[in-house]
Amino acid sequence: EVQLVESGGGLVQAGGSLRLSCAASGFTFDDYAIGWFRQAPGKEREGVSCISSSGGGTAYADSVKGRFTISRDNAKNTLYLQMNSLKPEDTAVYYCAKSKYALVSRRCADEYDYWGQGTQVTVSS
């Protein structure tokens, strides 16, 4: 059974940092790209960042470029999102998701077939 479990969310002041983790199991982790997505109340889900199976390819939403860094540890079956210089508009539930493919497209607009339950990130002003 495929499982993706996010952790690391919380409440932080604007300008602060958080590191999200996504622990994966039930599939061959280093065969697939993985992505981070977020959904704020009343808004559509958006792609934040994604990383190829090897970690050699990444993509970011324009809104987070230069502030967020995606990485993965294939030995630990874990995905990370380092979030710096957080802004109130980053407040959302953050989800990790498994892609159907090994590579990533420019805006993480690939097909994702398994999703985690999400972790809440709240940035206060």
Image (tube, rainbow, N blue to C red):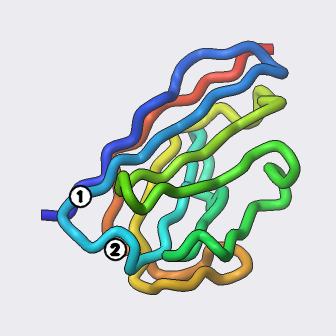
- Residue contact at pointers 1 and 2, CB within 8 angstroms: no
Position of residue 61 measured from the top left corner of the image (x, y, whole percent): 76, 61
Disc sitting over residue 83 in the figure: none
Q: How many marks on residues? A: 2
**Residue lying farthest left?**
1
Judge left or right: residue 3 versus residue 37.
left
Q: CA distance from mark 1 to mark 2?
A: 14 Å
Judge left or right: residue 23 versus residue 104.
left
Amino acid tagged 2: Asp
User: Which residue is at 56% across, 75% downward?
Assistant: 52
Q: Quadrant of the C terminus?
A: top right
Residue position for label 1? 25
Disc 1 secondary structure class: strand
User: Which residue is at 32% across, 44% downward?
Assistant: 5
Q: Nearer the viewer, mark 1 or mark 2?
A: 1
User: Which residue is at 41% across, 51% downward?
Assistant: 78
Disc 2 secondary structure class: strand
Position of residue 103 measured from the top left corner of the image (x, y, whole percent): 56, 84
Judge left or right: residue 11 versus residue 77.
right
Residue position for label 2? 113
Give the crowd class for mark 1: few <14, some 14-19, many >=20 residues within 10 Å.
Answer: some
Q: Image quadrant of residue 90?
A: top right
Give the crowd class for mark 2: few <14, some 14-19, many >=20 residues within 10 Å.
Answer: few
Amino acid tagged 1: Ser
- Judging depth in this view, the residue of 30 and 26 nearest the camera is 30
